[in-house]
Amino acid sequence: MSVIPFAEWRPDMPSLSQWAREALNVVPAEESYRPLNGLSGVSNALAARCQGAAWFRGTAGATKMFAGDATRLYLLSGTTWSDVTQLAAAKAITAITKANPGKVTVTSHGYGNGDKVFISGAAGMTQVNGLLFAVTVVDPNNFTIGVDTTGYSTYTSGGTAQKELFYAPGGDDTWRFTQFGPLAIAVNGVDAPQAFDLSVGTRWTVLGGTPPIAAFVTTVRDFVLMGKIGTTPQRVQWSGINNANLWGSVPANQADIQDLPDGGNVTGLVGGEYALIFQETSVRRMTYEGPPIIFRIDKIANDVGCSVPGSLASLIDMAFFCHKSGFYMVQGGQTITPIGRGKIDRTFWAEFDETNHFRASAAIDPVRGLYIFAYPANGNNGTPNRLLIYNWRTEKWAHAQVTCELVFGGVSQQSYTLEQLDAFNGGSTLETLPYSLDSSFWSGPVSLLLFAFDTTHKSGSFSGPALAATVETAEFAPGNGTRSVVRACRPLIDGGNPQIQIGARETQQGIVAYGPAVGLTPAGLAPVYQSGRYFRVRATMNAGDLWSNMQGIDDLDARPAGAQ
């Protein structure tokens, strides 16, 4: 018998077909399945569940990764997420005592107990500069900072105090980011849009001008575009040309507003040379025309839109999204192709926890050509615990069981010397490094990685050991309707310690019964034994096994039942 491949995973298709029923914790490749590396969290934890993350490259070439939770925005440095939340206007400091705790004098400070206050510019007692302190109010003009300053230098003059201003997105809101020249811009649908100068910034600040409160943001040509504006969820609004700080309806600068007449709420934006506006039941293309029209907006899909905002992810001229009717890909800003029909659409919607749809997230792995969608299955209290993995080059799917808060595309921020490896994370050995030495995590700023936050709010990349993997062949009938006995097969797997099971049943109405898992003989054969009319071969790889491709089985020893 010829090679029986570990077939394309299409759980929506009938059992007796050319498609497989399982491809778990693997990545679909050209003629095989490849390992899916596990998530290895190496950062410190955010204060709460991550609700959005992104990375950007500044004009000087340095990369920066940001994340946000329910109250703060963070910047990653090495493995440390630092709080870079916006600060209130500075108030002048006139005195700091050497005491336990130290007392700071600021006339009419207006702070409350527990507020976080950032101190900078103090002369003399420089030890307090650049730090956040939780304050205790003494009176309207004085507060203590919770640290012993008796051993600090004597305060002489100057300095300012700035209260940290927490954000207030709800649990069902998400931080979304874009880059506009040297600025990173963030929105969450509740707070004023935020800006971070990628060249010299140390904190997020309110975006200049009068930008709207928006749930979605992107960059299209020379404009910042926002969508789902305040109490007008079918509105999009764009900035002035080459000016992220100019908003409103300003014909001279081409800033304007557009209310969409139908299609439901805006559910996502994709930018570039043109923009794609996703709504609940429509997709529109937004093309720059120049004054007086500015942008021409054309509907390219009717009755198909993005039903799950977190499912939207894009790369260059491709965008992927999920509608109630299934998963789709938009290419070239015009062609919309179903990518889950007859494959995974029905299976996904049957297990998706729609009540917690806002917990879903998606990312692109451009190196391997993958769209990854993380979502909560029913019965998991809203925490995402499933990944769907689509290879757009092969048009094949796989799935994974990974629990996380969200997935996002990130980068390794620098390359590491041997000395830096030794000092990594406070001092590491080869045994305690979070990733293997051949992991792309260590190879430098051009390494694009798939990242996620785990349920302890720590981030890491999918660069850990390979996950335990399971794949199957399609169901086959070697006896052409008569009973057979299968006694052995040879798995085409190039490493690890494969465990092989043979499943069989007598009729299409019967339940597949799997025999015990067996390892391989020195000759590479799996000595399985099962009788029936219909068979499947299942291969399982242990977590941490080293292998590259799972292709199928060969040398199937199948004989008519009753034959010797």
Image: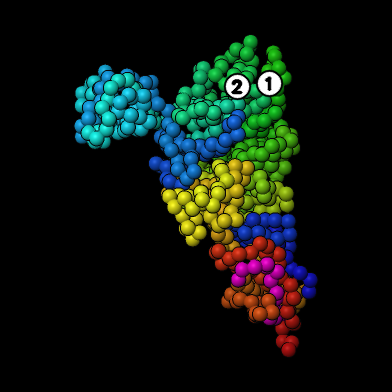
Instruction: Give, as a three-letter code, the residue at label 2.
Output: Trp
Judged from this view, the residue extending furthest toward the top is: 252
Q: Which of pointers 1 and 2 lies earlier in the amino acid sequence?
A: 2
Instruction: Give, as a three-letter code, the residue at label 1.
Output: Phe
What residue did someone put label 2 on? 238
Q: Position of residue 435 (x, y in %)?
A: 53, 55
Residue 474, quarter of the rendered image? bottom right
Q: Is there CB contact under 8 Å for labels 1 and 2?
A: yes
Q: Main secondary structure of the magenta part?
A: strand
What residue did someone put label 1 on? 295
Of residue 77 and residue 27, the one placed in the foreground of this image is 77
Which label number is shown at residue 504?
none
Of residue 554 and residue 160, the one placed in the foreground of this image is 160
On screen, residue 555 versus residue 420, left or right, reads: right
The figure's colour scheme reads rainbow
Q: Secondary structure at mark 2?
A: strand
Q: Indicate yes or no whether the magenta region holds residue 489.
A: yes
Q: Secondary structure at mark 1?
A: strand
Judged from this view, the residue extending furthest toward the bottom is: 564
> Which residue is depicted at the point 67% across and 60% down?
33
Q: Which residue range is magenta in the image?
A: 484-497
Residue 470 versus residue 374 in the image, above or below: below
Of residue 431 and residue 116, the one placed in the foreground of this image is 431
Q: Position of residue 343 (x, y in %)?
A: 68, 53
Residues at marks 1 and 2, CA–CA distance in whole angstroms: 10 Å
